[in-house]
Image: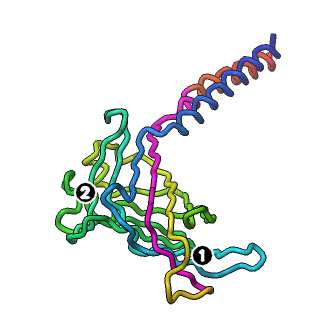
Amino acid sequence: MRKFSLVVFSLVLAIGMLIGVQGVAKADYILDFSTGSTGGAGGTVTLSDFNAVLNAYTVAVGNDIELSNLLVFSPSTPAGGTNYAVTSGTGLPYALLDFNTAAGTIEVWGSVPSLGVGTSSPVELLTGTISSSFYFNTFDGIDFVASGPDTKYPGLLTALGIPASTSFYMSGVVTVANGPEAGSTSLSPVYVAYSTDLSNNGTTVPVPPSALLLAPGLLGLVGIRKRLKG
């Protein structure tokens, strides 16, 4: 009987932890910045610090990469999400993305006019940390991929009805033109960015279900200990 009680306790605790992990992994909100249909080729990606052993450049720096669209998915949006135009906030029809893998930083500056965000001056719509990155050659160019945690401009979240406590994780792809720009060197080739997609999954889980099941499980363990002592 004692062994059975311990097995039941372990099973309940394991199920609680599994539910908690699933709850955290599910995205409640997705904010997807991209080149969009109105964006064109703009901005650059510069590679540097070539590693002969890896046969690859180890540092990538993105400057003024154009983003013109924000696609939002949430429990209240239509199945296909809701699109918002993003601009520079200074008269240009696109926001600007910058990143530096050596510093581990990434940011998007601009405005979302239809939401009244950054209309008087551009704001930092996204700021994050690059935890991992890599690039690979494709048929029509180079795909640069990066991921890591990020935060959003509080005014943007408020305008979208997203809780300020939402934690986001960024994953993005920047496709650059095949062949470096004229004038760049093999030590530091410069490429033009022509397609960008920066997706951010946001999750709000105030109290994981595993925490709710953990308390009664611990109480059961205390009861078992008392019976063993008795």
Which residue is more in the foreground, 29 or 65?
Answer: 65
Q: Amino acid at mark 1?
A: Val
- Quarter of the figure with the N terminus: top right
Left or right: where does residue 2 sit relative to residue 113? right
Residue 28 is situated, as x and y percent measured from the top left of the image, at 43, 38
Question: Which region is colored magenta?
Answer: 187-212
Q: Residue 198 location in percent, x, y?
A: 45, 56
Q: Quadrant of residue 206?
A: top left
Please say if 48 is above or below 141: below
Which mark, by number, is residue 5? none
User: Which image quarter is the C terminus in?
Assistant: top right
- Residue lying farthest to the front in this orientation: 139
Q: Is residue 192 covered in magenta?
A: yes
- Pointer 1 local density, CA inside 10 Å: few below 14, some 14–19, many at least 20: some
Q: Which sits in the foreground, 164 or 59?
A: 59
Asked if residue 103 is positioned above or below residue 35 in the image, the reply reads below
Residue at the (52%, 78%) spot, across then down = 46
Give the class, few, some or many, for how many residues have Cα within 10 Å of label 2's Cα (few <14, many ≥20).
many
Q: How is the image coloured?
A: rainbow
Q: Residue at x 55, y 76 (%)?
A: 179
Q: Quadrant of residue 17?
A: top right
Label 2, label 1: how many angstroms apart (C-alpha)? 31 Å
Amino acid type indicated by mark 2: Val
Q: Which residue is mark 1?
A: 59
User: Going by the image, does 216 lie left or right of 5?
Assistant: left
Q: Which residue position holds label 2?
A: 112
* Left or right of residue 177: residue 155: left
Taking the spot 66% from the left edge, 22% from the top edge, the residue there is 12
- Secondary structure of the residue carrying tag 2 is loop
Mark positioned earlier in the residue sequence (2 or 1): 1
Marks counted in the figure total: 2
